[in-house]
Image: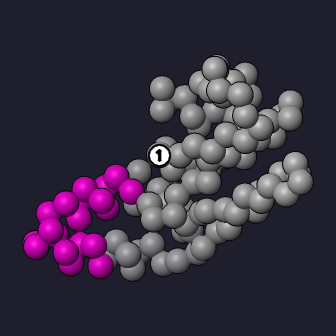
């Protein structure tokens, strides 16, 4: 259930990923940034590169696995969300889907 992903409890995430044995679980689609490291497991949702939902930055990350050592570095790229919204609004007459992009990805 995608709506369960925003949780920060490892027990919930272990239920979601039951049947998958891994040290690192990368997931997304919810655009909700999350990093949780418990019980030797790493649960990472990098957030959102192109649709920041109520923030002023896009988030991503770099996962490095080297000789069994796991590290994750979050990267936030700050940008002018109002300018992006304004530019999308200019596209609405030609691309009506731009309205949907504004509502779903920038104004929740």
- Relative to 96, is 36 above or below? above
Q: Residues within 10 Å of mark 1 (few under 14, many from 20)?
A: few
In the displayed structure, would residue 80 be above or below residue 19? below
Residue at image x 83%, y 51%?
Answer: 70
Residue at 61%, 62% in the rendered image: 60
Residue 100 falls within the magenta-colored stretch = yes
Is residue 36 in view from this perspective? Answer: no
Q: Position of residue 10 (x, y in %)?
A: 74, 28
Secondary element under disc 1, as helix, strand or loop, is: loop
Taking depth in this image into account, of 86 and 101 the one nearest to the observer is 101
Q: Is residue 55 left or right of residue 14?
A: left
User: Which residue range is magenta in the image?
Assistant: 87-105
The answer to whether 93 appears left or right of 30 in the picture is left
In the image, residue 74 above or below residue 89:
above
Residue 27 found in image quarter: top right
- Residue for badge 1: 29
Residue 76 as seen in the image, left or right of residue 85: right
Is residue 32 covered in magenta? Answer: no
Asked if residue 53 shows in the view, the reply is yes
Residue at position x 34%, y 52% in the image: 104
């Amino acid at each position: 259930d995608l709506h369960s992903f925003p949780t920060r409890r490892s027990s919930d995430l272990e239920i979601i990923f039951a049947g998958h044995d891994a040290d690192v679980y990368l997931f997304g689609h919810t655009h909700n940034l999350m990093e949780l490291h418990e019980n030797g497991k790493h649960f990472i949702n990098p957030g959102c590169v192109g649709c920041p939902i109520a923030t002023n930055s896009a988030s991503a990350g770099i996962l490095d696995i080297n000789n069994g050592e796991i590290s994750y570095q979050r990267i936030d790229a700050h940008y002018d969300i109002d300018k992006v919204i304004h530019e999308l609004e200019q596209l609405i007459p030609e691309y009506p889907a731009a309205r949907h992009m504004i509502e779903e990805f920038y104004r929740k």
